[in-house]
Image (cartoon, helix red, strand yellow):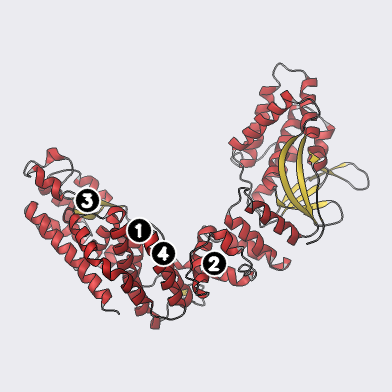
Amino acid sequence: MKTITAKPEDIRTIFSREYQIPMFQREYSWEQEQCETLWDDLIDFHNENDKKDKYFLGNIVVHPIDENEKFSVIDGQQRLTTLLLLIRALFDNAGTVKALEECLKTKDKLSSELTNNIRLNSDVIENDKKNLEQIILQGHCDDKNSRLYINYDMFKNKISDWKQGKTSDELNKLILTFLDNVVLLPILCETEDDALNIFETINNRGLSLSDADIFKSKLYAGIDSSKRGEFIDEWNDLDDQEDLFRILMYICRAQENDISREKGLRSYFSSKTGRLQNTGNVMASLKKINAIIDTKTGIYNDSLWNILESYPNQYWRYPLYVFLHKYLIWKKDGELFLPEEHYEEYKKLVMLTTAYYFIKGVVYNSVNTVKDTTFKVCAKIEHCDNYLSEYMENMCNDLKIFYNKLESADLGRCKRGIILLSGFLNESQSVEDFYDLILNSNIEIEHILPRKWSDNNDWDEQKAKEVMETLGNLAPFEKKLNISASNEFFKKKKKAYKESKFADIKDLSKLDKWDYNEVKLREKNIISRIKSFIKEVSDFI
């Protein structure tokens, strides 16, 4: 690492230079509340200041990008942008103050005259660049809904309110306090690599940047400058980058045959093994993971995947992502597909994954009971080992308790998932209809015997309480139809039931009555379905 210098500088000095926001940074994101806090702190400091104190606003990390005192901002762009908006707002309220204008605009190197180039330029988003230039150079903005304009306008109003009843001399004193007594600590690095390393170190020690921001800067630093624009476009096309990295962590762990306790996301990717050194490979994996959720592998598999989305934690998805990342192939049209030779294997994996996680979820209701098996299954998938038996060996001792809990309706946070699964397993259920429903409909859990007791006059109250939350009395139902069914008597609800595409609900429309015996019979049938499903997946081994 080359020479790094850090010396506190006042606002007047900070904005005697020109800054560039590189394209890998986030767009401007400070909310009005943050800007109001900055203003209130400035006024409090000004009121108490004895002209010797300094008000410290924090660090910025920069490195030079040419010989004309132009610097790339690796960390601190949000703060610098907000300060520039405040300077313009002060300038608007103060008439013409040359010292403020010199903070806003660069000087011509020969004539020392002010130019129409602003001190802070951004490569991040075109709209941000245009809006910032309009505000700083002209004091207005075409986009009145941009955060930049909202915060600038707020500063103008705050200053206008503050100076009511005050003399111009008092405003000038505030401006001098701001220019000469408010300081930042520029950490000046000779190279971009050094700046990125400092940036990462600072943020590992507590500043509020996301893991994805840290990873983005490291990936950005690892590619040729000619390809950085393409990288930013690809990065911005990704959905929820931080979650993609979490999935990638489990894929990498599987590839490394790592079944040890999991590490934090930032710690894992920042370790000395250089997991982010090859930007091309990392981005290829992230793009594949990003596309998996939209990749069709058969409506049976995809239906179970969507049922698993109701599971109370996310560990179920990692074995599926490891498998699909390993075997999915890009077609020429840019879509992913699963080769035919892997389809049946994947179907078995999805089915057994569904059985395993719901059994564990119902019996233990704890994330710690599935972690070790998840790690082992992921590693065995990646290394073509017998991962299905790993599931079975870890759940077979829990089956008796699981079935008992089904009968007692002690399903904990897995209740919704179990009800969806039982509906899917109804042999009369159209797989196509179910997939369409779970993908596109707002699904509620219907109490066939309504919970509102005044509507249940034909029932014994004790027996009603006994079966109210059991599997026999619960079924998935389209919200729209459920609203029309309301809490009516069974005979009145049958009309809405008949319109449902859920076989579990439609079957009810064929019954003449809904009594205790019907509930218990339906409960028995549902549990039988689930047992048959578990037996089917057990036969895979």
Distance between the Cα atoms at labels 2 and 1? 24 Å
Residue 433: image quadrant is: bottom left
Total marks in image: 4
The mark lying in front, picked from 3 and 1, is 1
Percent position of residue 531, x then y: 20, 68
Q: Earlier in the sequence, mark 3 or mark 4?
A: 4
Q: Is residue 20 left or right of residue 357?
A: right
Q: Determine whether 311 is above or below 448 in the image.
A: below
Q: Earlier in the sequence, mark 2 or mark 1?
A: 2
Q: Is residue 128 left or right of residue 381?
A: right
Percent position of residue 425, x then y: 23, 66
Q: Earlier in the sequence, mark 1 or mark 4?
A: 1
Mark seen at residue 311? 1
Residue 319: image quadrant is: bottom left
Q: Secondary structure at mark 2?
A: helix
Mark 2, residue position? 286
Mark 3, residue position? 446
Identify the residue at image location x=66%, y=48%.
128
Distance between the Cα atoms at labels 2 and 4? 23 Å
Q: Secondary structure at mark 3?
A: strand
Q: Secondary structure at mark 4?
A: helix
Q: Earlier in the sequence, mark 2 or mark 4?
A: 2
Distance between the Cα atoms at labels 1 and 4? 14 Å
